[in-house]
Image (spheres, rainbow, N blue to C red):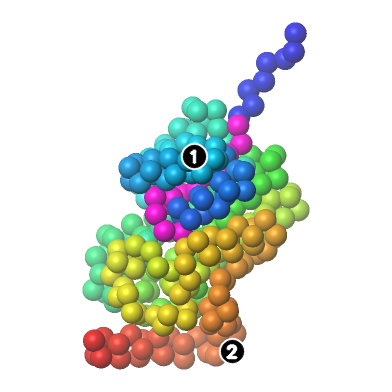
């Protein structure tokens, strides 16, 4: 008799998959043959996306609703995966949110919730399945932001969380590379998604030349991860902007960002 095995099915886990970049990443990964687990808080949107992916001829993703910002959110998600006989070979950390306004004026509780989701949950899910990622020689795609390259008055905590994502991901890229695990930070500039409305950012806050569709950002992220890249900044204007902290003092960049924000608000 052959020995009984308890092998778990490898899957690609995508967080924050109910809309925007997360949904676009799900379509791209599914199109390349990955078996997906989609997670977010909004079950109806996840189910609709899973139906769409299945209708396109791909394996229907499994949907698991989770509040990853809650202290036990990642643990409950991990328990649900294990109970279903699944383990990640790829983890795509897209869940996150932002808030616009002076840090002193914004709700402190909501800002701490932002740190919990953008940093704590992302770190947890990046580390939780390391052995599984090594076995499958898979990868981690962490969705950061162009904001992570510089301080951002008016988005102080958000920019700081994305600076963590960038630094953490670059280090993990180096540490896990010798084990065959790909780790990449996807750092888009402005993307036309519901993120802006939820963060309180006006639609015209950034020039159109910096904007990129969620689909193009997802394609760039997937290709960079599979190509073994450390960081990808979609769009030439955004890549140029990401180099500015190397060329100018951070104090100057912070002052310019604050002046620009004040000027736009006066003009508006």
Q: Is the Cβ of the residue at disc 2 closer than 8 Å to that at disc 1?
A: no
Range covered by the magenta-colored residues = 9-21
Measured from the top left, where is residue 184 in percent x and y?
A: 61, 60
Mark identifier at residue 7: none
**Label 1: how many Cα within 10 Å (few below 14, some 14–19, many 20+):** some
One can see residue 181 in this view: yes
Mark identifier at residue 54: 1
Helix, strand or loop at mark 2: helix
Measured from the top left, where is residue 194 in percent x and y?
A: 34, 62
Left or right: where does residue 118 sit relative to residue 131?
A: left
Mark identifier at residue 247: 2
**Label 2: how many Cα within 10 Å (few below 14, some 14–19, many 20+):** few
CA distance separating discs 2 and 1: 47 Å
111 part of magenta stretch: no
State whether residue 52 is above or below residue 259.
above
- For marks 2 and 1, the one nearer the N-term is 1
15 part of magenta stretch: yes
Measured from the top left, where is residue 204 in percent x and y?
A: 33, 79
Measured from the top left, where is residue 146 in percent x and y?
A: 50, 73
Left or right: where does residue 266 sit relative to residue 129?
A: left
């Amino acid at each position: 008799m052959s020995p009984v095995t308890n092998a778990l099915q490898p899957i690609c886990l995508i967080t924050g998959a109910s809309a925007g970049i997360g949904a676009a990443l799900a379509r791209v990964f599914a199109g390349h043959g990955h078996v997906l687990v989609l997670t977010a808080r909004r079950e109806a949107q996840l189910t609709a996306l899973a139906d769409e992916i299945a209708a396109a001829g791909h394996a229907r993703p499994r949907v698991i609703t989770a509040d990853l910002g809650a202290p036990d959110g990642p643990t409950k998600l991990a328990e649900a995966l294990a109970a279903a006989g699944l383990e990640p070979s790829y983890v795509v950390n897209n869940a996150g949110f932002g808030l616009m306004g002076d840090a002193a004026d914004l709700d402190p509780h909501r800002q701490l919730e932002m740190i919990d989701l953008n940093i704590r949950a992302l770190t947890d899910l990046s580390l939780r399945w390391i052995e599984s990622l090594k076995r499958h020689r898979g990868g981690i795609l962490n969705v950061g932001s162009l904001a992570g390259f510089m301080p951002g008055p008016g988005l102080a905590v958000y920019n700081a969380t994305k600076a963590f994502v960038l630094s953490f991901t670059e280090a993990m890229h180096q540490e896990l590379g010798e084990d065959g695990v790909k780790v990449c930070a996807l750092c888009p500039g402005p993307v036309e998604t519901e993120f802006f409305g939820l963060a309180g950012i006006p639609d015209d806050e950034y020039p159109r030349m910096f904007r990129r569709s969620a689909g193009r950002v997802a394609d760039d992220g997937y290709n960079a991860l599979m190509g073994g890249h450390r960081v990808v900044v979609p769009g030439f204007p955004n890549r140029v902007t990401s180099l500015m902290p190397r060329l100018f003092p951070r104090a100057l960049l912070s002052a310019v960002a604050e002046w620009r924000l004040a000027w736009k608000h006066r003009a508006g």
